[in-house]
Amino acid sequence: MCGIAGIYNFKSLAPVDQETVRDMTNIIAHRGPDADGFHFDGPVGLGHRRLAILDLSERGRQPMFFHNRRYAIVFNGEIYNYIELRRDLIAKGCVFRTDTDTEVLLALFAEQGVDCLKRLNGMFAFAIWDSVDRSLFLARDRVGIKPLYYSITSDGISFASEIKSLLVSKETTPTVDLPLVDTYFSFGYVPGTKTLFEGCQKLAPGHWMWVRPTGITTRSYWDVCYAPNTHRTEEQTAEELRELLLDAAKIHMRSDVPVGVFLSGGVDSSTTVALLAEGGFENLKTFCVAYGGGSAYDETKYARLVADRFRTDHHVLYVTPDQFKDFIPRYVWHMDEPVTEAAAISLYFISKLLREHVTVALSGEGSDELFGGYNVYRRQQKFEAYRKLPAAIRQGVLEPLCQLTGNGKLREYARLAALPLEKRYLGVPYNDSRYKQVLYTDDLWAAVGTNDDPLAAYYYQTRESDALSRMLYNDLKTWLVDDLLIKADKMTMANSVELRVPFLDYRVVEYAASIPSHMKIRRGQGKWILKKAMRNRLPDEILDRTKMGFPTPLRLMLQEGLSGYVYDLLLSERSVNRAYFKSEAIETLIREHVTKKVDHHIVLWKLIVLEEWHRQFVDTKNSPVHASL
């Protein structure tokens, strides 16, 4: 796990500004505190920050070269099947001078070109410079575990692991893409390949980009297809899934530095610990985080249950509201993009503790999006069943009754159920679009215009699939990538920790897509097939418990200890002068929330993150460099 950055002036082929490449690389030093490295070749400059995981010697430093220095690579991530790939390459006569996965990747690219991507099992974002063809090849892993940002500049392209590197290059200005403020407000993040920074883009998961003097070519090399296998029995499916997860967990433990596990006590992280124990890994170090405020925000007893069962070296950290509040500006700085994932702050603090003991950590990220773990999936399935009722019953009886009742939640459910899935389901977080009518100023409405639907292509891709598969595909492509995985990468790398996610081994992803939906959700229980696979391997208290999902007492904190901060931030002159939102509406939301009249914590948190993002990156007196100090 590392940080990469670079520039290629492919338009004019003018020599690259070496100092700029060094600045771009140094600002992400937290991603790789062990070493830095640079390579300059006329119009191209590559920078690398190293977090040493495999082959800790000087030989493992990057940029790394191959084939008489024709190829140079900067690489962020891990290739988990590098041992098997290395063995095949040696059999063909390839000679290696390191024990790194980086050199294996470079050798495989030299032999197979773009086709090498199909053989990689791992998480990665990398750039390879071909000094003979004068071309730059960029690629991102199938699921999008590792980020890769880029900007098309006046003379070429700049790229990096984090947006702040692009801003340092001065070719990308911190200008807000105003229509995307509305997209952010709809989702709590910006899904897809765009970012809230105008001109700054993300290479999509499962894509490569080839940059040549003649121009840029981008292609997809992988996608997941939902094709349920109805011939396997439930027992066969559960056993095959468990064996596949066991192998994924084993290869994710390949490391020359200590490895730990984020253990929340939920099904996913507990499954990871159980599989590692079954695989023969002993004396595991596990880590859990919690808040005070009652059992609703504390999973430690479940984590302790699993830790005791598998005899792990268990560590628990409690985060206070003051720690949470004080870290918000730096959270936004590390995230680059405004993302309203409050649990990310908890992850930062537990990663900080973890770094005192290990360098690599495994987590259960991705399981819910593969096996239908969120409650919202079950609710949406009920809406789908409702929509199959005769129109006379729905429109003539049930919907009028819902409108007459004083139950606001029931009326909202009736409104949502009337919509088709494509318009009703925008992702896991519930985002009430009616807030826009209350908050947006005329200036913001004018700037928003008509936005493209960022989910339309994903719904079209799965138009023949069942409702659950369509939701899972959307979340795999958007919520998982642009919220959860971005959060996981940025918060762990802020502490120089490498996070690995065995559930997102591409083989597991593809297998999960072949499991029929009725094996994922059954009798109101999500992740049914995963729980069946782990029954008798995990305590029933873990398998049958209610999902909590890294709970953060944000509602309570915004009502109590953080209420003054919210007033000062959102009603400040600087915030009001942006003319995005009506200050009187914000004041009403804050008052209603603090007095516990109405829970507005979701929309208030969106406003907080967006304002802090402006202060960290957009306001002229701040720059990414200053914000990092």
Image: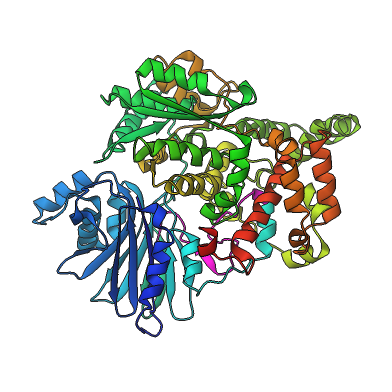
Q: Is residue 372 left or right of residue 413?
A: left
Q: Is residue 511 visible?
A: no
Identify the residue at image location x=53%, y=60%: 193
Q: Nearer the viewer, residue 496 or 68?
A: 496
| Pick the front one: 561 or 140 | 561
Task: Say which residue appears at 83% left-offset and 35% top-offset.
Answer: 595
Q: Is residue 16 above or below residue 226?
A: below
Query: How many numbered callouts?
Result: 0
Predominant SS of the magenta segment: loop
- Taking the image as shown, residue 287 lies to the left or right of residue 60, namely right
x 11%, y 57%: residue: 94
Judge whether residue 204 is colored magenta: yes
Question: Is 154 located above or below residue 522 in the figure?
Answer: below
- Quarter holding residue 400: top right
Task: Write down the region rendered in magenta.
Answer: 186-208
Closest to the observer, 189 or 490:
490
Task: Give the side of residue 463 with respect to residue 12, left or right.
Answer: right
The image position of residue 33, as x and y in percent, is 35, 53
Q: Position of residue 626 (x, y in %)?
A: 53, 63
Is residue 302 magenta-colored? no
| Residue 557 x/y as whole percent | 69, 36
Q: As rendered, which of 134 and 609 lies closer to the eye?
A: 609
- Asked if 137 appears above or below 519 in the picture, the reply is below
**Would residue 533 be seen by someone viewing this image from the given angle?**
yes
Query: Where in the figure is residue 28, as x and y percent of width and height?
Result: 42, 58
Q: Is 207 left, or right, of 528 in this rendering?
A: left
**Coloration mode:** rainbow
Instruction: Please identify the quarter of the rendering in which residue 251 is found.
Output: top left
